[in-house]
Amino acid sequence: MIPCSKDVLKLTYEKFQLQAHGDDVKLEEVADVFSSMPVGQRLTVIPSGFVEEMMQLAVEKSYEARMEDVRDILIAVFRMEFSDDRLCQELLNTYKPIFDKYEMDMSAIRRSQIKQLYG
């Protein structure tokens, strides 16, 4: 990830939150934003409810998943803390068969990290 300021991350999340609705957004875009969220969470710049909205979008758009999207989303989940375990579990359950499909296309370190999510 390219280093950026807290303000840039905050603006990115706020803009995405305003623009991300249903068919207007692709999973690739969700995954791109998702990959920055562990840093955003550490810097406390993620708007209220944004993590939950992104998780819901990731579940809704899972049918579009490419290997890169699956990897980026699950690695972000690996690095984050969640207040809604139910929604996190729904995302993990949704992505498990997709991860299984693309697992061998990922690097060994990424596979290992993601497998820790699934116990």
Image (tube, grey):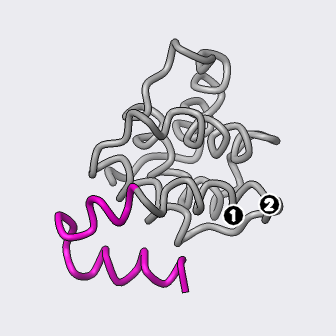
Question: Residue 102 versus residue 77: which sits nearer the camera?
Answer: 102
Q: Could you tell me how many numbered marks the image carries?
A: 2
In the rendering, at what x and y percent does residue 47 appear? 75, 40
In this rendering, the answer to whether 72 lies above or below 58 is below
Locate residue 94 relative to residue 83 in the image: left or right. Answer: left
Disc 1 crowd, CA 10 A, few/some/many (<14, 14-19, 20+): few
Q: Is residue 71 left or right of residue 25?
A: left
The mark found on residue 89 in the picture is: 1
Q: What residue appears at the point 49 percent right and 56 percent down from the top-left corner?
A: 95
Residue found 69% across the figure and 60% down from its top: 88
Name which quarter of the figure residue 85 lies in: bottom right
**Position of 8 relative to 102 (above/below):** above
Closer to the camera in the image, 87 or 46: 87
Q: Nearer the viewer, residue 52 or 43?
A: 52
Residue 112 sits inside the magenta stretch: yes
Image location (x, y in percent) of residue 1: 33, 54
Q: Disc 2 and disc 1: Cα gap in Å?
A: 5 Å
Which residue is identified by label 2?
86
Residue 51 lies within the magenta run: no
Mark 2 touches mark 1? (CB < 8 Å): yes
Determine whether the residue tagged by mark 2 lies in a helix, strand or loop. helix
What crowding class fits label 2: few (fewer than 14 Cα within 10 Å), some (14-19), or many (20 or more)?
few
- Say if 29 sits above or below 106 in the image: above
Q: Name the chief secondary structure element in magenta.
A: helix
Secondary structure type for disc 1? helix
Q: What type is the residue that disc 2 sits on? A: Arg
The magenta span reads 98-119
The C terminus appears in which quarter of the rendering?
bottom right
Residue sitting at 22 percent across and 81 percent down? 108
